[in-house]
């Protein structure tokens, strides 16, 4: 099977997750100077931002060159989920700065709960897409889903830097909350708009029964 350019970029994104995680963990756990700590955090944030950017690049290339592949369809959403979920877990685990100087001490818990909701949303959408794909249907993403992706990408990137300045904790949290809202809204909108996918089997059976009845007559 020939691997397309878009799929190669997706695979590169998956591999890029490893150094991103390594840099972030090293910054938090390694006994290094303040300057080295800041450098590691910034590098991790830059690598994460590159991961997010390639998500748009590989999709654009696949559509532009008409090289959308089944492997790419499987790996792309998988890479997105892994990148976001893993980084959110690490942020909640290490980021004391999320309390914003004690003003909002439960912020890390809220982010953890929202992360669980976002993961559930992604799994639900994945099920819908899998069912649709098995029936030869393509379910297009809407504008709200794209807003969700941008907000979560930006929010998580800024939250990675939250330990460097209290203001970054505020900015990252607000953007992340906005992304979480659009995650829930776009998820519900996606399900309601595509609920016919779940009825496809029943509709198909009714059509088949009707055709058999007509043929018998």
Image (spheres, rainbow, N blue to C red):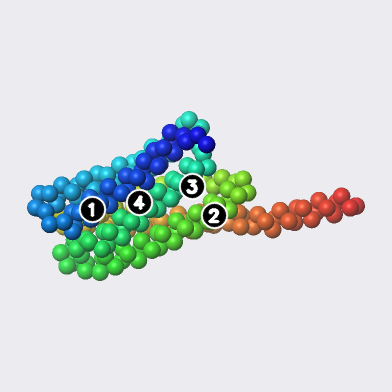
Q: Please name the residue that numbered disc 4 is placed on.
A: 83
Q: What number is the disc on residue 128?
A: 2
Nearer-N-terminus badge (3/1) = 1
In this view of the protein, can residue 165 be seen by the observer?
Answer: no
Nearer-N-terminus badge (4/3) = 3
Question: From the viewer's perspective, is residue 79 above or below residue 62?
Answer: below
Task: Determine whether the residue tagged by mark 2 lies in a helix, strand or loop.
Answer: helix
Nearer to us in this view, 182 or 154: 154
Q: Please name the residue that numbered disc 1 is placed on.
A: 24
- Residue 47 position by quadrant: top left
Label 4 vs label 2, nearer the camera: 4
In this view of the protein, can residue 132 be seen by the observer?
Answer: yes
**What's the residue at 27%, 48% (across, down)?**
20
Nearer-N-terminus badge (2/1) = 1
Can you give x and y, in whole percent of width and height, for residue 118 in the image? 40, 59
Residue contact between numbered discs 3 and 1, judged by CB atoms under 8 Å: no
Neighbourhood count class around disc 2 (C-alpha, 10 Å): few under 14, some 14–19, many 20 upward: some
Q: Please name the residue that numbered disc 3 is placed on.
A: 74
């Amino acid at each position: 099977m020939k691997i397309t350019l878009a799929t190669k970029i997706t695979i590169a994104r998956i591999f890029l997750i490893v150094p991103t995680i390594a840099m972030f963990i090293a910054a938090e756990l390694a006994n290094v100077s303040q300057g080295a700590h800041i450098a590691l955090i910034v590098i991790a944030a830059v690598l994460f931002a590159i991961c997010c950017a390639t998500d748009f690049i590989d999709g654009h290339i696949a559509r532009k060159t008409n090289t959308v592949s089944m492997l790419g369809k499987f790996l792309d959403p998988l890479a997105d989920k892994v990148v976001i979920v893993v980084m959110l877990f690490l942020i909640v685990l290490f980021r004391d700065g999320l309390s914003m100087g004690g003003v909002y001490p439960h912020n890390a818990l809220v982010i953890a709960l929202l992360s669980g909701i976002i993961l559930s949303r992604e799994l639900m959408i994945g099920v819908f897409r899998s069912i649709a794909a098995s029936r030869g249907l393509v379910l297009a993403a809407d504008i709200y889903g794209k807003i969700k992706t941008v907000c979560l990408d930006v929010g998580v990137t800024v939250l990675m830097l939250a330990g460097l300045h209290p203001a970054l904790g505020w900015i990252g949290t607000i953007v992340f909350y906005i992304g979480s809202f659009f995650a829930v809204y776009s998820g519900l909108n996606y399900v309601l708009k595509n609920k016919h996918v779940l009825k496809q089997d029943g509709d198909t059976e009714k059509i088949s029964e009707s055709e058999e009845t007509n043929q018998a007559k």
